[in-house]
Amino acid sequence: MTKRLKWEIVIGLLLIALSAILFFAQAIIFHRTRDTFFHLLQNLAFLPIEVLLVTIILDRLLAFREKQDVMRKINMVIGTFFNEAGTDLLVFFLGFGPLPAPISNELHTSDAWDNSRFAMAINILRAHKYHVDVGPEKLESLKHFLLGKREALLTMLENPALVEHDSFTDALLAVFHVADELSHRKSMSGLPESDYMHLAGDIQRAYHLLVLEWLYYMKHLKKEYPYLFSLAVRTNPFDASASVIVRQQNK
C-alpha cells in the first residue's frame, strides 16, 4: 500500500467520523432524531446526482480545459520550431525535390482558406509521393544547417508536452534522424549509390511529414492568430510569389 493511498484512507475515515459526530451532536442538541435521519437519507438520495455532476461532467470539463492548455503549449513549441528551423528546412527540401506545380499550388494558403480547404490540401499532400535528388553539395549544405540547429531540435524533442502530439513528434524524429545520418558521415562525396539512395529515403520521409505539419500549423494560425498567419502566408516557402513586404492591394 502506497503512502498516498494510506493518506487518502486516513482522510476518508476522519471525514466519516466527523460526519457521524455532527449528526450525533445534532440529535442530542435538538432531540429530533427522526428529522436527522430524514435529512440524512435525503442527502444520500441526492448523492448519485452529485457524483454525476462532479466526477463525470465536471471532470470532463476540466480534462477538456487541460487538453486545450496542453495543445496551446504544443503549438507554441511547433511555432518555435518553424520559426527557428522548420521553414528554412522546407526550403532545403524543396531544393532536393521541387513540388510539381499542381501540388505546390495546393500550399498557397490565404485568408480565404477555411477548414474544408485545409482538409483537402492535407489529403492531397498526404497521398503525394515525394522524390528527391541528393548530391554531395546539397547534402553537405543540409548537414551544416542541421548541425547548427541540433541543440535546438534536441531541446524540442525532450519537451514532455510533445507526448500529446504524435504526428509532430514523428516529423521531428524524422528530421533528427536525417541530422544523425549526415553527422556520422565525414564527407558527402564519394559515397556509394546505395548510400545516396538511403539518405534520399530518409529525406523523403522527413519532407513528407514536415509538409503535413506545416499545413496543420498554418490551420492553427489561421484560426487562433490571424496576424501570425498573415506573416506565415507572406513567407510561404512553397509560393514563389510570396513576399514579406506588405503591399497595397488594387481595388
Image (cartoon, grey):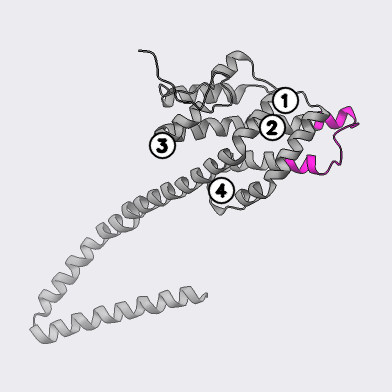
Between the C-alphas of marks 1 and 3, the distance is: 31 Å
Between the C-alphas of marks 4 and 1, the distance is: 28 Å
Disc nearer the start of the sequence (1/2):
1
Crowding near the residue tagged with mark 1, few <14, some 14–19, many ≥20 C-alpha atoms within 10 Å: many
Find residue 175 and report its horizontal and vertical position in percent. 68, 39
The dot on residue 205 is: 2
Residue lying at 17% horizontally and 85% vertically, measured from the top left: 25
Q: Relative to 138, does residue 42 appear above or below in the rendering?
A: below
Q: Relative to 220, does residue 247 appear above or below in the rendering?
A: above
Q: Is residue 196 magenta?
A: yes
Q: Tell me the amino acid under the disc marked 1.
A: Phe
Disc nearer the start of the sequence (1/3):
1
Between the C-alphas of marks 1 and 2, the distance is: 13 Å
Can residue 178 be spotted in the picture?
Answer: no
Which type of secondary structure does the marked residue at label 2 adopt? helix
Q: Tell me the amino acid under the disc marked 2.
A: Arg
Res 229 quadrant in image: top left
Q: Tell me the amino acid under the disc marked 4.
A: Leu
Q: Is residue 63 left or right of residue 179?
A: left
Which is closer to the viewer, label 2 or label 3? 3
Find residue 96 and report its horizontal and vertical position in percent. 72, 25
Q: Which residue is mark 3?
A: 225
**Disc 4 to disc 3: CB gap under 8 Å:** no
The dot on residue 162 is: 4
Q: Which residue is mark 1?
A: 96
Disc nearer the start of the sequence (2/3):
2
Question: What's the magenta region?
Answer: 179-198
Between the C-alphas of marks 4 and 2, the distance is: 19 Å
**Disc 4 to disc 1: CB gap under 8 Å:** no
Disc nearer the start of the sequence (4/1):
1
Q: Tell me the amino acid under the disc marked 3.
A: Tyr
Quarter of the image that includes the C terminus: top left
